[in-house]
Image (cartoon, grey):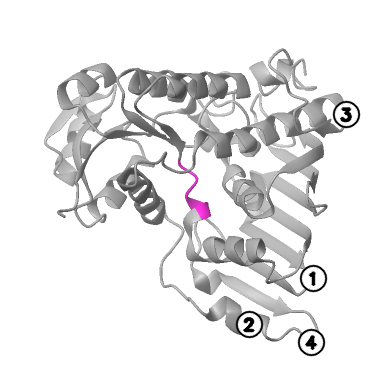
Amino acid sequence: MSQRTYRAAIVGTGGIAHAHAQAVAESGGRAELVAVADVDAGRAGEFAAKYGVPNSYAGTEDLLRAEEPDFVHLCTPPQLHAPLALACLEAGVTALVEKPPTLSLAEFDTLIEAESRSAGHVATVLQHRFGAGAVRLRRLTEAGTLGRPLLATCVTQWYRDEDYYAVPWRGTWESEGGGPTMGHGIHQFDLLLSVLGPWSEVTAVAARRARPVDTEDVSMALVTFESGAVATVVNSVVSPRQTSELRFDYERATVEVAHLYGYTDDHWTVTPAPGQEDVRPLWAADRSEGSSGHGGWLAAVLDALDQGQAPPVTASDTRRTMEFIAALYASAFTGERVRAGQITADNPFARRMDGTGAPWRNQ
């Protein structure tokens, strides 16, 4: 049977779109980039020329109507993600949405409802789930090979200066939905959640320490999981020594990864507990040279579509991460512990991530 080639399109041709175009180009013929769209027609044309894309458009609806793509990569600023994803779903086209997928939990629920009525799907680009180390760790965790997960730390300490926030849509609740909790740390704690499973409660703080923004520039959370494991989560854009780190302490070993914007197997280390040296060969058994970039994520998307399944990261998986973000903000801004399921549709933190308002809003 000949392999199917999917028709792909990109909407929004800014910086992250290049990673998407490269992933399509490296898909081994499984996907073909047939069109791009951008409100800046000149930039769209330049992007199309660079990647050999035959057609460029100034609007998403024109692209959807003319090209009938199988899926569309949405690489626009965050406030456009939900309306563009809805347009794709209404056209029966799968939307692959960059993070954060929406500005709020309620907005994400509108995508879930629209997906239920569409031949298309909505999936969030959270590519760190698909690096070999993460896949291996989930497999060993699910098999109980490492023993019970006991403790984890999740750190995203990045540095973004004032020039970074000079871009009009950055640093506001209305256009970005939040600060480093929404737009930066999401990759790391989404990976944490994918390994440790359902979370049960969150206690958090958030602060605006240094950047001239409406959102937080630092947040921290203590998280308890249904398994009983506990974790700390740190998100920052004020940290000059940048790092992205995850550490998982199991009964039989500590498993760690330290990188910045993407990892390979070389970034992971395993430290067996005393008397548990047999863990090392189990970790090294299927070593990979691949990275946690967009290529591995797109391959997983194409595998799912080949099998007639919803592509990852599925709406149900992403909702757990989005609910976690809403709970973190709710805890930080109310001073209360927030449990899973507590952010219901009528909760102000479901409608906006800043809920009743950040404590510094009038400063």
Name the side, left or right, on which 25 lies relative to 133: left
Please tell me which residue is depicted at 69% across the width and 67% down the height of the picture.
Answer: 144
Q: Magenta stretch: give its range.
A: 125-129
Q: Which residue is identified by label 4? A: 275
* Whole-number angstrom distance, CA of label 1 to CA of label 4: 11 Å
Residue 78 % position (x, y) = 48, 27
* Whole-number angstrom distance, CA of label 3 to CA of label 2: 42 Å
164 is higher (above) or lower (below) than 106: below
Residue 6 % position (x, y) = 22, 42
The residue at the far right in this view is 336
Report the amino acid beneath label 4.
Gly
Name the side, left or right, on which 8 lies relative to 106: left
Magenta stretch: residue 126 in it? yes
Residue 143 % position (x, y) = 64, 65
User: Of circles 3 and 1, which is in front?
Assistant: 1
Q: Earlier in the sequence, mark 4 or mark 3?
A: 4
Tell me the tag on residue 34.
Answer: none
Q: Main secondary structure of the magenta part?
A: helix
Tell me the tag on residue 280.
Answer: 2
